[in-house]
């Protein structure tokens, strides 16, 4: 089982502890500034948090392409080789409107959703009404919580009850030969995310909020503790990584779609309360 990096010597240990304590101090102060949290219509009524202890990456290392990208380019340059962010490839304005907080609560508030723990190798699950999740579970990530203690709404949706919502979603048009798409819909609070894991290829689109991604190719296993949150990895391990060991990373925003190839390691971190949907190709 892999563990976090940064334990090679006392100076690194001390530096990592200093960084963690400094960011924890800033985060604690900022939590009291609730008036800085926006609930604006342009964010669908979801929180846009200014107190997340990490922000967007300094430099995006995932190539961005616009809607002029062709299927041939996608297959030859990205599908089996590297991630890519595609902008404006579909128009999901109708789906986005349905994903406003007020609209979702009105349509699905009494429906059950299944929450999973945000750790890598084992997933406990509980079922709660969607409104209860929004009112009691949807909150910023606690810096000291483990993945097993962090409940995350992503996937495990009842397609009978949520089918009318998914029918309004237009997935990216490019498919890998021999695959079909399966949706996984999620809503998560600022600072939450899923730690490093891998599976088959797919797309992820942000509907509201911002989602930061960290990716490694299949032959480069990242160092991480599978029961620590992505937030703790970003605060404690990421700053100590040599340049050659840094992940491919970027932040995707509403209207952008990230494609990730088969078996690429990836972890996610929601910088705001985020509404998002993935299309897994299998």
Image: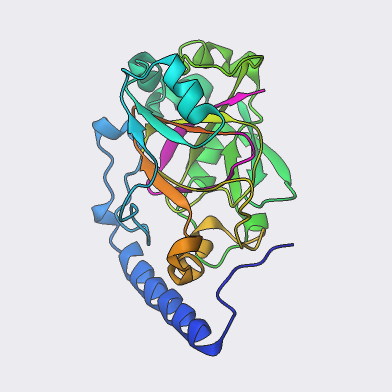
Question: In this image, 55 relative to 200: left or right?
Answer: left
Residue 281: which quarter of the image?
top right
> Where is residue 150 shown, x and y percent of the image?
60, 53
Residue 96: which quarter of the image?
top left
Looking at the image, the residue that sits furthest to the front is 76
Q: Which residue is drawn at 56% across and 86% down?
A: 9
Q: Which residue is drawn at 52% across and 64% down?
A: 232
Residue 180 part of the magenta segment:
no
Q: In this view, does 258 lie above or below 91?
A: below
If the image is split into quadrants, where does the C terminus sit? Answer: top right
Q: Is residue 107 visible?
A: yes
Q: Residue at x 32, y 19 (%)?
A: 67
Question: In this image, 22 relative to 107: left or right?
Answer: left
Question: In this image, 64 relative to 224: left or right?
Answer: left
> Where is residue 40 shown, x and y percent of the image?
25, 36
Q: Which residue is drawn at 47% across and 62% down?
A: 244
Q: Main secondary structure of the magenta part?
A: strand
Residue range highlighted in magenta: 262-282
Q: How many labels does the image show?
A: 0
Q: In this view, does 260 lie above or below 165?
A: below
> Where is residue 6 shown, x and y percent of the image?
55, 75
Give whichever of 279, 122 is nearer the camera: 279
Give whichever of 26, 249 is nearer the camera: 249
Q: Can residue 277 be seen in this view?
A: no
If the image is split into quadrants, where does the N terminus sit? Answer: bottom right
> Where is residue 66 shown, x and y percent of the image?
30, 24
């Amino acid at each position: 089982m892999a563990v976090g990096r940064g334990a090679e010597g006392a100076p690194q240990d001390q530096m990592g502890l200093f960084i963690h304590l400094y960011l924890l101090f800033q985060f604690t102060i900022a939590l009291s500034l609730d008036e800085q949290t926006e609930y604006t219509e342009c964010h669908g009524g979801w929180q846009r948090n200014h107190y997340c202890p990490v922000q967007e990456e300094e430099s995006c290392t995932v190539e961005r392409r616009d809607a002029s990208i062709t299927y041939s380019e996608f297959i030859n340059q990205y599908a089996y080789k590297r991630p890519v962010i595609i902008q404006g490839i579909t128009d999901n304005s109708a789906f986005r409107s349905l994903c406003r907080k007020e609209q979702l609560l009105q349509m699905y508030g009494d429906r059950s959703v299944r929450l999973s723990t945000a750790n890598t190798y084992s997933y406990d699950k509980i079922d709660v009404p969607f409104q209860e999740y929004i009112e009691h579970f949807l909150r910023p990530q606690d810096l000291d919580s483990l993945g097993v203690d962090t409940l995350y709404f992503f996937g495990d949706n009842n397609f009978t009850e949520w089918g009318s919502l998914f029918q309004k979603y237009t997935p990216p048009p490019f498919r890998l030969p021999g695959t079909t798409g399966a949706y996984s819909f999620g809503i998560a609070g600022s600072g939450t995310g899923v730690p490093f894991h891998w599976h088959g290829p797919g797309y992820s689109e942000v509907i509201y909020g911002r989602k930061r991604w960290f990716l490694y190719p299949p032959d480069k296993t990242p160092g991480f503790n599978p029961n620590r949150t992505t937030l703790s990895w970003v605060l404690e391990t990421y700053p100590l990584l040599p340049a050659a060991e840094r992940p491919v990373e970027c932040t995707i925003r509403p209207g952008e779609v990230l494609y990730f190839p088969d078996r690429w390691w990836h972890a996610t971190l929601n910088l705001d309360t985020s509404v998002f949907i993935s299309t897994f190709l299998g």
